[in-house]
Amino acid sequence: MPWRKMKLRGATVFARCDASGELLGEGGRVEIRYKPQDGRAYAAGARNLQPASDATVFPDEHCGEAERVAAKGKGGARGSRKAGKAGSAGPPPERPHTGEALAYCDGACSGNPGPAGLGVVLRYEGVERVLSEYLGQGTNNVAELTAILRACEGAPDLDRPFRIYTDSTYSINMLTKGWKAKANRELIAQTKDVLAAFRDVRLHYVKGHAGIPLNEKADALAVAAVDARASAGWSEGSYDEGA
């Protein structure tokens, strides 16, 4: 079956379709790939998929063989691995341990709902990647959850231990404690799917607006996106591994 380039909450994905470009799904969910050859297949709600500016329909071989990434707790080689619980010993870190990746995520909203944005600071092996993304109209919870999703999408690989820090207890409860979602169900399910693909991922709570440098930096990136009503996209630099 062919693939069509679509947009899913601002990210470009490839979705299953027929020869005419009509999406194909089961139970309202469509098979998608974030990258054609990364070996990971996900499912997304058809109503959340929007046409991309490039409407090209690609042949079946455009995306290679892939293993379905199971939702948290539903089995699979990686899907059986749960996201970690909140909390950590000692002060929140500014640098990852050797071989790890570290991310700080934050969301911002001017009014709730209102103009929303997110910020991510991602560090590994001396590389620092930052993201400032405008989400349009949304809620603070949507911004916080999407920030975690973007951090996962920006991670260097799935086998590296990954620590994610957020000041959103809502996100931690929904993603790691099995709380039943009354809203944002598609976004929560999608984020759980992506978390489940990692071999070792942990979510940690960090107190917001408490002078913690990387949390403050993520917050500033989120606020900047809301203030500018624009996304800056990922940018890459470096950090001092020994400082």
Image (cartoon, rainbow, N blue to C red):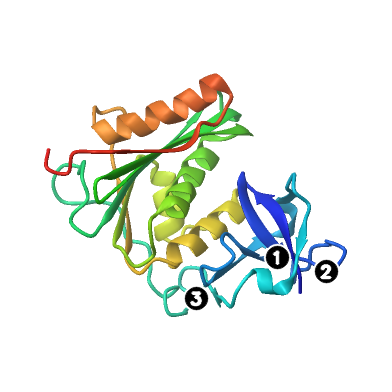
Instruction: Name the front one of labels 3 and 1.
Output: 1
Query: According to the image, label 3 marks what residue?
Result: 74
Q: Residue at x 77, y 56 (%)?
A: 56
- The vertical placement of 156 against 29, above or below, is above
All told, the count of numbered labels is 3
Residue 229 visible in this rendered orientation of the protein: yes
Earlier sequence position, callout 2 versus callout 1 = 2
Examine the rendered structure and indicate whether residue 76 appears above or below residue 38. below
Q: CA distance from mark 2 to mark 1?
A: 15 Å
Tag 3 secondary structure: loop
In this view, the residue in front, 232 or 117, is 232
Query: Measured from the top left, where is residue 205 in percent x and y?
Result: 30, 45
Q: Nearer the viewer, residue 68 or 38?
A: 38
What amino acid is found at the position of numbered circle 3 in the picture?
A: Lys
Q: Earlier in the sequence, mark 2 or mark 3?
A: 2
Marking on residue 18: 2
Identify the residue at the far right of this view. Answer: 20
Whether the residues at callouts 2 and 3 have beta carbons within 8 Å, the answer is no
Residue in the image at 78% along x and 61% along y: 57
- Crowding at dot 3, Cα within 10 Å, few <14 / some 14-19 / many 20+, comes out as some
Dot 3 or dot 1: first in sequence order is 1
Looking at the picture, which amino acid does disc 2 mark? Asp
The residue at which mark 1 appears reads as 29
Of badges 2 and 3, the one in the foreground is 2
Q: Position of residue 83 (x, y in %)?
A: 37, 62
What separation in Å lies between label 3 and label 1 (alpha carbons)?
17 Å
Would you say 32 lies left or right of 211 here?
Answer: right
Percent of width and height locating residue 51: 76, 49
Name the residue at 52% across, 72% down: 39
Labels 2 and 1 touching (C-beta < 8 A): no
